[in-house]
Image: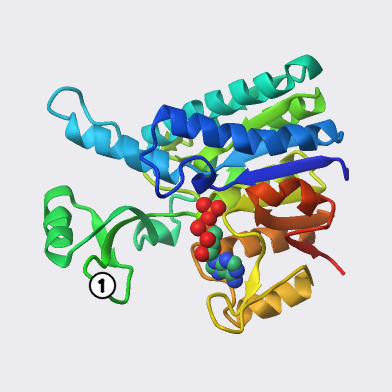
Amino acid sequence: MGKRIMIALGGNAIKQPDELGTTEEQMKNVATACGQIAEISRQGFEIIITHGNGPQVGNLAIQQEQAQELVPAQPLVILGSMTQGQIGYMMQQSLRNLMGEESIEVVTVVTQVLVDRDDPDFTDPHKPVGPFYKEEEAIQLKIEKGWTIRKVRPNGDRQWRRVVPSPVPLKIVEGKAVRKMVDAGMIVIASGGGGIPVILNEEGKLEGVDAVIDKDRAGEILAEDVGAGIFLILTDVDSVKLDYGKPTEKPIQRMTVEKARTYAREGHFLPGSMGPKVEACITFIEHGGERAIITSLAKAVNALEGKAGTTITRN
Ligand code: ADP
Ligand code: MG
């Protein structure tokens, strides 16, 4: 069990905030991430990968909007499935180019994730997506497009953003298929962007919904499905901090589930970013995982050896 690892890659690992998001830029970033993953694979770990898609899905949404006079705009749920293919392709190729000789098969699974159609976030959405707007612009978009908008910054010129529902993931529809592939020795990329959100409709059939599932929460469920012993979350900070952003800020090297809960209650981990990551780690350990690690992409290999990052364990 200890040699099976679920890796969750942050969206920023693939398109950094200061970049345009050209294919060349994204390929280069993917190659950096895959360099770390290839090294982990060489150490004998069985690997399952999930990833964010925020920047990619945001860019695709702009393309839909700008071109809708020519071709029909696709809904968010379709854009989510498109980014799974896009990022999966880049990673499959990059990993293959890095590990060709070692002949590990790498596959991407287009993944649906079941959510409750009565999830409260459908009527009271919370996940900010896309650009920041001025109040007048935001109100205009609300009227024109029927978006839900929210003030997400306490000050500044552009405080408003579109928000979409972020329902709790209940089940990975292709979870068993992913497990079979991992058991067969493949590196599997799945549940990208948190997965394609689907509900069971009135006839009991799967149906896509416009929402964004948190990739760390969905990744945790997938980690359980494949029986991973380690959950490695790679983001843009080297470790989890106490008093984040304050002069007293301090990195956490190790914490037990109990400590993590206490710190969470004390408000050290912000909602919508570090909060869901720590929460996902706690759930993972409570449901039988051995250890969970949060660190930056560059420190992945070191963190796995316990030399960097934040490690969360039962005791
Ligand atoms: P990802 O795309 O990897 O999911 P997020 O932006 O969602 O990245 O989460 C990482 C961010 O969490 C960091 O860049 C940091 O700004 C923020 N953060 C919030 N609380 C903390 C904390 N206690 N320690 C470290 N980072 C924190
Ligand atoms: Mg995030």
Residue 174 showing in the rendered view = no
Q: Quadrant of residue 89?
A: top right
Q: Quadrant of residue 225?
A: top right
Q: Is residue 153 left or right of residue 218?
A: left
Task: State which quarter of the image contains the N terminus.
Answer: top right
* Front-lying residue, 150 or 160: 160
Residue at 54% x, 26% y: name it: 90
Mark 1: give few (<14), some (14-19) or many (20+) Cα within 10 Å.
few
Q: Give the number of callouts.
A: 1
**Residue 186: x %, y % from top left:** 75, 24
* Front-lying residue, 240 or 145: 240
- Return the residue at label 1: 156
* Front-lying residue, 233 or 168: 233
**Which amino acid, by three-letter code, is at mark 1?**
Gly
**Residue 18: x %, y % from top left:** 40, 48
Residue 166 showing in the rendered view = yes
Residue at 12% x, 27% y: name it: 69
Residue at 47% x, 54% y: name it: 167
Q: Quadrant of residue 228?
A: top right
Q: Is residue 287 left or right of residue 175?
A: right
Task: State which quarter of the image contains the C terminus.
Answer: bottom right
